Amino acid sequence: MKGKKILALLIALLVAVSMTACGSSGGTSEKKEGTSKESAASFDDMVKKAKGTTVTFYGWGGDDLLNSWLDDYFAPRMQKKYGIKMKRVPMNIEDILSQLSGEKQSGKKKSDIDMIWINGENFKTARENGFLYGPFLDKLPNYGKYYNAKDRENNYDFSYPIKGYEAPYGKAQVVFEVDRAKVKSVPTDTKAFAEFVKKNPGKVTYPAPPDFTGSVFVRNVIYDICGYKQFQNMKADKETVRKAVEPAMKYLKSLNPYLWNKGKTFPESSQKADKMFADGETIFRVTYDAYDISKYIENGTFPKTADSFQFKKGTIGNTNYMAIAKNSGNVAGAMVAINEMMSPEVQLNRYEKLHTVPVTDNSKLSKAQKDAFAKVDLGKGTIPQAQLLSKRLPEMPSALVPIIEEIWEEEVAGK
């Protein structure tokens, strides 16, 4: 959490210096950002302009299967179809934001970054500091053809207005997992989960926030105990939030004596927690990737008896997005690549190969396209897509997330 605060402060200071040095040219008005040559050009013109260029795609590189898919499927497709070379640059989003901030402060005219994998509070930070190009979403043909412009997740990212500054990339939704050979019945709410933890002392844990997965587990517990509607328009005031989440924090604190290492420490990352589950050290796993269990069963990482479940009231889901750096040297190429990533063909291939929940609107697909998506075998241990999405809960506003993480550190972890 301290690292996030330092990064946010650094970004604010650098942007302030940049705006002082550059005067009005450093402004972030949407009118100025939306009147570039790329915005005014037709999509066909962008395709022609992008031919023979390279597009850099910056984002978290910790998913080996996704990395392989981008390198072995999407990059060759872009080269063959458009003559565009895709260069994947693995980098944590905090470092991406820091780089964008440094480039802006130095007055660099062309960023090394074109496309960015982003969402949540990181999008809010990037947007408010003028790091992103746009609006561009409504200029992408595939968005108009295959997406519902009224869908909340195409308009709000963690309740923060998108306003065309990012395009949907993939959907995520929380599921819980156990080994059915060791667990006969799964908890369907937080009350039952407490009993589950007590019956299996030392065998349950979750990653420590601000790890992305650990943080959403805490928010899901809050929703189950406190409801979710009150948070959607809640003021980002720490004491207001503290009062609202108090019952959930007391609940989480009460679990500590029965958790792995008696709740004195928590796994520092979801990768560490996943390994503990795979090794049998723990019997419970939480993940944002609703269908990754099947690939882990298939490659032998998880036992064949691993299975997914949700709470009765539902689990949190969100969309992750693609954005473009404000000073990208290849806006046209980035827009062509993003448009292609949003195509039904590419989304279907991701669904088949990576089991990523597609972002296309099923009602806008042809019968043949619908049938192709319906035929995808999601593999063992997964929840059917219709059932999964029927229990999809909205994310909290991004401004509340770091506040909740701070409160968890103070009241649950006791740091």
Image: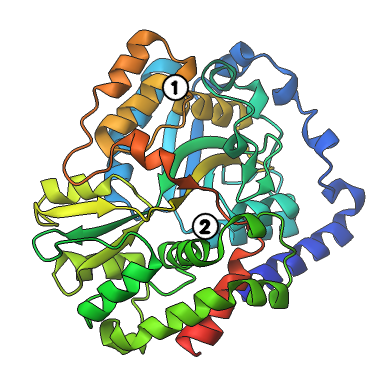
Query: Which of the 4 image quarters holds residue 137?
Result: top right
How packed mark 1 is, by other alpha carbons closer than 10 Å (few <14, some 14-19, many 20 or more), is some
| 53 w.r.t. 80: above or below | below
| Precedes in sequence: disc 1 or disc 2 | 2
Task: Residue at 37% x, 20% y: name it.
Answer: 345
Q: Residue tagged by mark 1? A: 362
Mark 1 or mark 2: which is in front? 1
Looking at the image, which is closer to me, 246 or 304?
A: 246
Q: Secondary structure under badge 2? A: helix
Amino acid under label 2? Ile
Q: Among all residues in the image, which is located at the extreme right? A: 24
Q: Secondary structure under badge 1? A: helix
Looking at the image, which is closer to me, 273 or 234?
A: 234
Locate residue 335 relative to residue 261 in the image: left or right.
Answer: right
Where is residue 385 shown, x and y percent of the image? 33, 35
Task: Residue at 30% x, 15% y: name it.
Answer: 371
Amino acid under label 1? Asn
Where is residue 276 shown, x and y percent of the image? 21, 71
| Measured Cα–Cα span from mark 1 to mark 2 | 30 Å
Task: Residue at 67% x, 41% y: name it.
Answer: 162
Query: Which of the 4 image quarters holds residue 207?
Result: bottom left
Q: Residue tagged by mark 2? A: 93
The disc label shown at residue 205, or none:
none
| 395 w.r.t. 253: above or below | above
Where is residue 153 shown, x and y percent of the image? 58, 39
How packed mark 2 is, by other alpha carbons closer than 10 Å (few <14, some 14-19, many 20 or more), is some
